[in-house]
């Protein structure tokens, strides 16, 4: 549900009168990677950690050419925990702006 102050992204076309093609809301997601391929991740959000295994709903995170990484892309592997900032495009799909792996992005304490 959108609220006053939420960031949104609108893709549109036209001159003079503009027509919206899609509207996306900015989201932040933390969770575990359950599938990783070259252009996308499947992540089970922390918010579903309490759910039974059959009720956990995964989210597909698309990694595009403009996605920024807090670590090397090669660290995005199954079992790793990630933090994603991106755009909710609907149907449990996120277009990622930034992706960070928890284990490699946390400062080391001596």
Image (cartoon, rainbow, N blue to C red):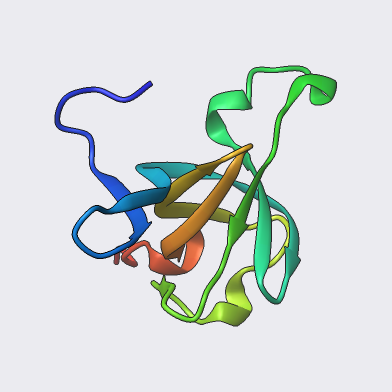
Residue visible at 61% across and 69% down in the picture: 76
Quadrant for residue 45, please give it. Answer: top right
Q: Nearer the viewer, residue 100 or 20?
A: 20
Quadrant for residue 14, please give it. Answer: bottom left
Percent x, y for residue 2?
Answer: 31, 25
Percent x, y for residue 67?
Answer: 44, 73
Rendered position, 16 above or below 93: below
Rendered position, 1 above or below 58: above
Question: Outermost residue toward the right?
Answer: 54
Q: Nearer the viewer, residue 26 or 74?
A: 26
Residue visible at 64% across and 18% down in the picture: 50
Residue 5 appears left or right of 32 = left
Image quadrant containing the N terminus: top left
Residue visible at 45% across and 53% down in the picture: 84
Question: Outermost residue toward the left?
Answer: 5
Q: Nearer the viewer, residue 72 or 38?
A: 38
Residue visible at 41% across and 54% down in the picture: 86
Percent x, y for residue 34?
Answer: 75, 51
Residue 3 appears left or right of 5 = right
Residue 54 appears left or right of 19 = right
**How many numbered markers are drawn?**
0
Q: Nearer the viewer, residue 90 or 83?
A: 90
Residue 61 appears left or right of 89 = right
Question: Outermost residue toward the front?
Answer: 16
Image quadrant containing the C terminus: bottom left
Percent x, y for residue 103?
Answer: 49, 61
């Amino acid at each position: 549900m959108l609220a006053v102050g939420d960031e949104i992204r609108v893709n549109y076309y036209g001159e003079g009168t503009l027509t919206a093609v899609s509207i996306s809301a900015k989201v932040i997601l933390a969770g575990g990677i359950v599938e990783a391929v070259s252009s996308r991740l499947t992540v089970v959000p922390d918010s579903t950690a309490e759910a039974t295994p059959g009720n956990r709903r995964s989210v597909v995170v698309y990694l595009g050419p403009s996605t920024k990484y807090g670590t090397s892309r090669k660290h995005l592997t199954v079992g790793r925990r990630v933090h994603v900032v991106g755009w909710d495009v609907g149907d449990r799909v996120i277009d990622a702006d930034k992706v960070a792996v928890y284990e490699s992005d946390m400062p080391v304490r001596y």
